[in-house]
Amino acid sequence: MYLTKTEIINKPEWTKSLVESFLGAPDKLHKMRGHTNPANLYLADRVAQIEATEAFKIAVNKSIPRRISSKLAADKKRENLLKQVADMPIKLSSSCGALTSVINQAISDYNCWNTLSISLGDIEKASLDSSPDFLNRITVNFIRHTRMDYDKDLETLIGKTGVIDAVNLLRKRVYAVISDSYKSLEQECIDQLNSRWICK
């Protein structure tokens, strides 16, 4: 039986550095479909034998203060990032007017972006005769991407500690502003928030 490197690191005793120090090179490489690099596999029996050694137990105990310090630092970074999102000014562009006007703008924007697909018959051209659900969806998307700083704000979060919670909070605030401004779009905002919510 083999364990992947990820499975080992997810065990409470192990860290990446302990894997390198005590396990060294993997016992087997396994090519996985859809992945460029093969998975590193380690014999479960060898892992168990190392865990039972006195040297490993000493190394684990020595690593505890570093782990606590790292966790505290990560928690602080996560807290700061959430505060950054909470303090962001989330608002609609001044160019947003009556809902009917925004819907017409969303229709034009959708058709412009999908000119090729529409001409090939892959999708239908949007119009005021399209279904209400469809119009609500493209209108919320249009507002979010072109009448707010959502995309720019999202870019400031990429690669930072706590990004999942921060993105969820940003989306929650963005959809709240849209639904508060256009009550008829409230359900669409709720549906999009739920479908885009990132679970850890």
Image (spheres, rainbow, N blue to C red):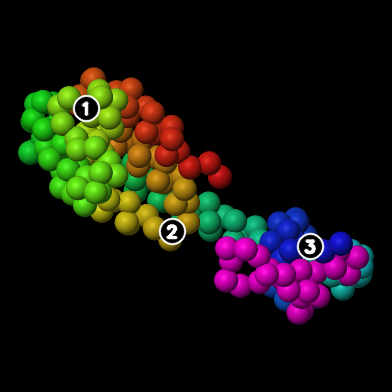
- Choose the circle earlier in sequence order: 3 or 1: 3
- Element carrying mark 2: loop
Q: Image quarter for residue 147?
A: top left
Q: Image quarter for residue 185?
A: top left
Q: Nearer the viewer, residue 82 or 98?
A: 98
Q: Which residues are magenta?
A: 24-46
Residue type (three-letter) at the residue carrying disc 1: Ser
Residue 156 visible from this viewpoint: yes
Picture layout, residue 108 above or below residue 48: above
139 drawn magenta: no
* Residue 143 percent coordinates (x, y): 20, 38
Quarter of the picture holding the C terminus: top right
Report the Cα–Cα distance between label 3 and label 2. 29 Å
Picture layout, residue 45 above or below residue 119: below
**Are dots 1 and 2 in contact, CB under 8 Å?**
no
- Residue 130: which numbered mark, if any? 1
- Choose the circle earlier in sequence order: 3 or 2: 3
Picture layout, residue 200 above or below residue 34: above
The residue located at (25%, 23%) in the rendering is: 132
The residue located at (7%, 38%) in the rendering is: 95
The residue located at (37%, 27%) in the rendering is: 190
* Residue 75 percent coordinates (x, y): 53, 51
Residue position marked by numbered label 2 in the rendering? 160
Which of the two discs, 3 and 1, sits closer to the camera? 1
Report the Cα–Cα distance between label 1 and label 2. 40 Å
Residue type (three-letter) at the residue carrying disc 2: Lys
Q: Nearer the viewer, residue 119 or 184?
A: 119
Which of the two discs, 3 and 2, sits closer to the camera? 3
Residue position marked by numbered label 3 in the rendering? 3
